[in-house]
Amino acid sequence: MTGPKRAPRRVLLIGAYANGNVGDMYQADAIARELLTVDPTLEVWSASPSLRASEYPARRHQVLPSAAVRDPEVLNSFDLILVGGGGLLAARHAPLPEPDWVNSIKTTMCGLALGCAGPALAEASQFIQRCNLFSVRDEFSARAVAPIRSAVDIVLDPVFLSDFDLRPRLKSADTRGIAWIPGKLVSDTLDFYGRLNRDAFARKADVYISLNEETDKDSGFEEMFGAGVRYLGALEAFGRLLQPRSFAVSERYHGCIFALKMEVPCFGMTLRSDTVTSKISELYRRLGLSDALIGVAGNLNRKRLNTMSKTCFDFSRITRVRRRERARLHEFLQSCLDEAGR
């Protein structure tokens, strides 16, 4: 005889998936994919309290209304809450800094691959201490959170580790031009991008790509780069733009990640403080790509960059790192599930 069938364990993902940033919008589905690789019987949901309320992919999980994040009855009906990934502790993201919200969580809660820096980190100290298990995305974040919590794992960005949507591009001798992926313009970067636009951009071959239309437009993209900026809302469009390009140069963290996943050489721009740019520099250091970082005074000579794009990027090594780090992600997710089962 067999007993009653056990209901599947339910996991809720909470993050900035609906904030309109193409990088963040794929976090939930990437995490869901990896959770279901660890345990195919899980029931995975997500909820995003982001004010923009943009739609995000949900091919491998189900989506709750944003209001669910404020409903303790709903939250505590899940066996496990995973908060992440992304820089949720590098800028203020409600409700994480709110003590009443943290105290309302009675189920198992873990932080996943979080970016941590600055005042937002201190504001969310109670959340950080409350998590049963806690992981950050890089060493910079681990050092930042150390005064608040000693038990911290490092798990790389799930979008980088998960094998979804973007495949290596087809090898072709017809690639030409550069995909430039600027970050939001700020006073510290205006001179750099003015120099790039004047001295390095080739209008017949290159393309400017925006991964966050609202913030990029508001920061002055069209005034700086002209009306030809390509504003993207999905990875498929990103892949089509990168396919014919020789290489990419990105100040956007997920621009770097998407390009490297396609095996397109991508230089990372570190134009601002470590608080902002550490996510790129830490990733590139781990991948052995420190020579492919460009600072504010960086050399934008096209010939030099083209030569470096052919010599700096060992994609077999990058693949080995991704496989190793994906196994660490799975170990952490299994630990979270085990914690929820105690």
Image: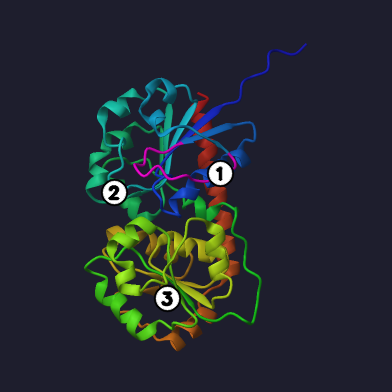
Q: Residues within 10 Å of mark 1 (few under 14, many from 20)?
A: some
Disc 2 from disc 1: Cα separation: 27 Å
**What's the mark number on residue 339?**
none
Disc 1 from disc 3: Cα separation: 30 Å
Instruction: Measuring from the top left, give residue 113's x and y in whole percent.
Output: 43, 47
| Amino acid residing under circle 3 | Asp
Q: Tell whether position 55 is magenta.
A: yes
Quarter assignment of residue 296: bottom left
| Amino acid residing under circle 1 | His
Disc 3 from disc 2: Cα separation: 28 Å
Lower sequence index among marks 3 and 2: 2
In the picture of the structure, the residue carrying the numbered disc 2 is 91
- In the image, is 298 to the left or to the right of 232? left
**What's the mark number on residue 291?**
3
| Helix, strand or loop for the magenta stretch, by majority | loop
> Which region of the structure is painted magenta?
47-60
The answer to whether 336 is drawn above or below residue 244 in the figure is: above
Q: Residue furthest right?
A: 1
